[in-house]
Structures are given as C-alpha cells and as structure tokens.
Amino acid sequence: MARSSSSSSPAKEPGRLKQMYQVFTMTRRADPSSVWWFALAFLGPVVVGVLAALLIPGQNWLAITLWIIAGVLLGVLLFLIVLGRLAERAAYSQIEGQPGAVGAVLTNSLRRQWRSSEMPVAVHGRSQAAVYRAVGTPGVVLITEGQVTNLTRQVEEERRKVARIVPNVPIHVVHVGDAADQVTLHKLPRAMNKYKKALNRNEVLAVSNRLDSLTHGPASAIPKGIDPTRVRAGRPR
C-alpha cells in the first residue's frame, strides 16, 4: 500500500532570510522610493566606518578592520529598523480605507499597556463606518473609521456611556483618515501614545475590565488589589 506521508506533511516555512527578502520585495512594490531609504540606512554607516578607518591617523590594521566591521554591523541594524518601519507602513497602506483596518492596527501595533479589540463598539449601518475603543495610560480613546459625519451620534453615545461607567477617566477621540484634522492609519499608534498619562497599569486593567463587563455582558469582579475608587468607576444606572 503506497504511503501518502509526503502529501500530508505540512509545508515548510520559509527561512529567516527568505522572509526578510519577501518583506523587502513587498515594501519595494508598495513604495518604490523605499529603496533609497534602504540604501541610505545601510551605506551611510559603512561609508562612515571606512572613512574613519582611513582618515584617523596612527591606526594599525586591527583598528582599521574594527572600524569597517562596526560600520557594516551598524548599517545592517539600521537597514532592519528602516525595513520594519517601512514594511509596516506599506502593509497598512494596502488596507487603509477598508473596514476593519483600525481594528488590525489596534490588535497588532499597540504597546502592552493598551487594551483594545479588533471589533468595533459601534457601527453605522449604511456606510459601515465604525467606532473602536482602546484603554491605556492616557485613559479611554475612541477611534473612528470611515466618514466622521456618519458617526457623530455613535461617538457621543459611546462617550456618554464611558463617562457614566468610569467617571473622571479622560476620554479622547481620534479620527482616522486623510483630512487635515485626521490621523493616517500608520500614525494611529503614535497619535494615541502622545496623550498625557492619566492611569497606571493596574488602573488600565480595571477600567478596561469594567467597560467590557458592563457594555458586553454581565458584570465581573474587578481584579484583586485594585481600588475601584482610584479609577472612579461608578455603578451603572
């Protein structure tokens, strides 16, 4: 009886270098000008290392070699940093304007002190414009996706709901889009982190749990060690 192990075996994942090349190719296709940034990031430190090795007097062969190696290593590091930033921007540019794009950013790009969901808390029926909610050290942030004019009522309702459940916790609103008073998708995490810190990590957890429990299901207990009065979370009416 013939064996079918070869057909049922899982496909082998590409190696690290191949993955990097795939990311580089995707980024270059989405933004052709990124090639110049990659070249500058790598060649800049290499040129500085070579010039330092050749122009600084009184060096032996070991010092010259170390300068060149340091330039190459720094160039590789800067190349990887630029690749990560531009690849993220290219990926978000491909989904920008599509429903759920904000949820993808909230899920994948926020720091650990933030608590959010890829699912919106309010949706406009006709246009599918949506309002998302995130809780972090700045307080509660409401993020709109789609036509802002279609979300006026939803944003105000969510603002009142949050203010009723957790009074005195700061509430911020960020509009994602291309207009002058809006934030582009790839700059959303940076815009959210610019707000002044108002809560500590434990208070973020307490506020997030209270909002989730009182807006999506039966109330659950606040984690031990958290004083509800510190986050000023009032009882639902």
Image: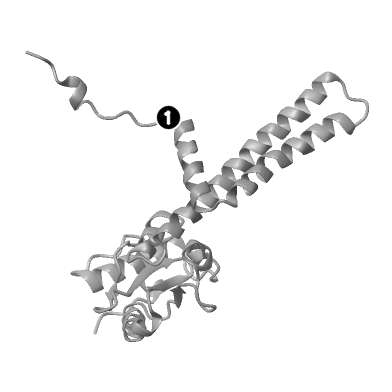
Disc 1 residue type (three-letter) = Gly
What is the image's colouring? one colour
Towards the viewer: 144 or 225: 144
69 sits left or right of 139 in the view = right
> Where on the picture, by quarter, is residue 70?
top right
157 sits left or right of 53 in the view = left
217 sits left or right of 33 in the view = left
Residue 112 seen:
no
Q: Is residue 13 above or below residue 165?
A: above
Residue 124 percent coordinates (x, y): 28, 78
175 sits left or right of 73 in the view = left
The quadrant the N terminus occupies is top left
Residue at the spot 32% in from the left edge and 60% down from the top edge: 224
Towards the viewer: 78 or 206: 78
Residue 73 percent coordinates (x, y): 66, 33
Residue at the spot 49% in from the left edge and 37% down from the top edge: 21
Residue at the spot 53% in from the left edge and 63% down from the top edge: 190
Q: Is residue 126 above or below residue 41?
A: below
Disc 1 residue crowd, few under 14, some 14–19, many 20+, Cα 10 Å: few
In the rendered image, which residue does mark 1 sit on? 15
Residue 8 percent coordinates (x, y): 18, 26
- Furthest toward the right, the residue is 57
Q: How many marks?
A: 1
Towards the viewer: 225 or 117: 117
Label 1 residue SS: loop
Residue 48 seen:
yes
